[in-house]
Structures are given as structure tokens and as C-alpha cells.
Image: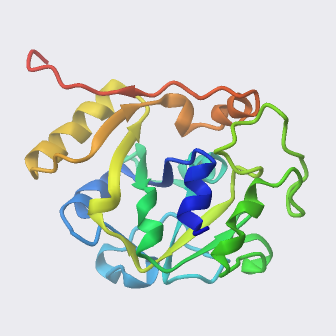
Amino acid sequence: MSAYDILTTRGVTRLCHFTKFQNLTHIITSADGVLASSSIRQDTKNVNDTARYDGELDFVCCSVQYPNSWFLKKAMQNNLDKIFREWVVLYIDLSILKYKNTKFCPCNASKANGAYISKNMDNIDSIFAFTVSTFTYPRTSKMLSCCPTDGQAEILIENSIPREYINGIVVGNEDVAGRVYSILKMYGVEHISIYIAPDVLTTKWSNMIKEGCSPNEFRFEWSEED
């Protein structure tokens, strides 16, 4: 089976990539969407991971089903911007795996300077193993089948994530949801849904999925009265 088939069989519905709220306008106004670090113009460069110990500057890092909220928390803490404080999570259509060159890693791709990154996508199911050599904790019997054993497991997508594959934006509250909606409406982007899911933006989802529960995600519906 292809990597896409393996993941969908497990119930995986999406990949995740988090970014600063201020990056949204650049992302949704370009057909290229999210660019790999090496492709971003220096005068507009605003990347999540300036170190990139994985060395994969031509690839965009994504997590499976839920975001790498541990790294997101670190990025939030390191954010020195006093004006743009909000972050969002982008949901990426899994079908992108059919058309893009990809790699995977059973843990955070930067671990041991990228030593655990694999090009063999036929082995992608290994990220769901009961035990993963790079991760201390074994998989629980109740754990959602769509979630990797290590929540920081990654899929790396070459060059970019085109806008057409972004089908959702997750925010932490209604205020940010309204601001995202205004941006999407301004630029006529209609295929992207907005979700309010505060637990997805923190590490709380990790313990929930280990018990077989999914965090609540409420689709934001704009009211003309607002």
C-alpha cells in the first residue's frame, strides 16, 4: 500500500502545520501556500524553527492528525513579538502525499540532527508501533489508531504545501476565529474551514487521545449579526 493508503486505513484524516497568525495573509494569497525555509524570501522570512537541526531546509515539517504542540509551546514562549502573539494550526489534506515527494520520522525530525528521518514511505506504519525506539513511552491499548505513538512524529513535504491542500485553520478562541474569517473573506478563499479547538493548540490533546478520546473541535460559523 502507498503511504496515503496506510494512513487513511488507520483513520488519519489530515496533517498539521502550525504558524504565526501574521503569516496567514502571505500563505492564503499565494498558490504556493506554505513554503519550505529555503524558498522563503529573506525580506519576508519568518520561520518557526530557525535552527532546523534536521537539515531539511527544502522540506516543510508536518505532524500527523494533531500538531506538535510541544514545539508549538516552545515557539510561543520564544516569540518576542509584542503585537502578533497568536498562533494557528493549518490542517493539510492527506491527499498531498500522492503528489509530493515526502519523508517521515518516528520522532521529532531534529532529533540527533535528523538521523531518524527515512525516505522509505512504505514503512510509514512504523510510527504507530507499540514501542518506538526513539520514544520512552509505549503505546496505550486505548490510544486512537490515527495518532502516532510519539506525538512529535513528522512527515516532511518537499518545497511547499500549496494553498489548495490547506482545508482547515484551527484557532484557540472566537476572537481569533473572527479575524481569520475576515482575512479569508477579504481574499475570496472559500474552501478553508475555521475551527475553534483550544485543546489542539496545547499538549492537552495528548493525554486525551491516549484514552481513546478526541479533543473537541467546533467549526466556526460567521453570524451576520456579529
- Which residue is located at x 18 percent, y 62 percent? 29
Quadrant in which the N terminus appears: bottom right
Colour pattern: rainbow
**Most foreground residue, 225 or 41:** 225
Q: Which of the pair 171/91 is nearer the observer?
A: 91
Q: Can residue 99 be seen in this view?
A: yes
> Which residue reaches farthest front?
1
| Residue 106 in the image, given as x and y percentages of width and height | 74, 64
- Looking at the image, residue 119 sits to the left or right of residue 101; the answer is right
Q: What residue appears at the point 44 percent right and 71 percent down from the top-left corner?
A: 98
Q: How many labels does the image show?
A: 0
Whether 24 is drawn above or below 113: the answer is above
Residue 124: % across, % down:
68, 66
The residue located at (16%, 46%) in the rendering is 190
Tell me, yes or no, if residue 62 can be seen here.
Answer: no
Q: Is residue 138 above or below residue 19?
A: above
Q: In this view, does 27 lie above or below 210?
A: below
Which quarter of the figure is the C terminus placed in? top left
Decide if residue 7 is on the left or right side of residue 88.
Answer: right
- Tell me residue 199's x, y (percent): 56, 30
- For image coordinates 31% across by 82% down, the residue present is 41
Q: Is residue 99 left or right of residue 223?
A: right
Q: Image height check: is 102 above or below 78? A: below
Q: Quadrant of residue 163?
A: bottom left
**Image position, residue 82 (x, y; %):** 40, 47
**In front: 80, or 61?**
61
Q: Which of 22 and 208 is in front in this view?
A: 208
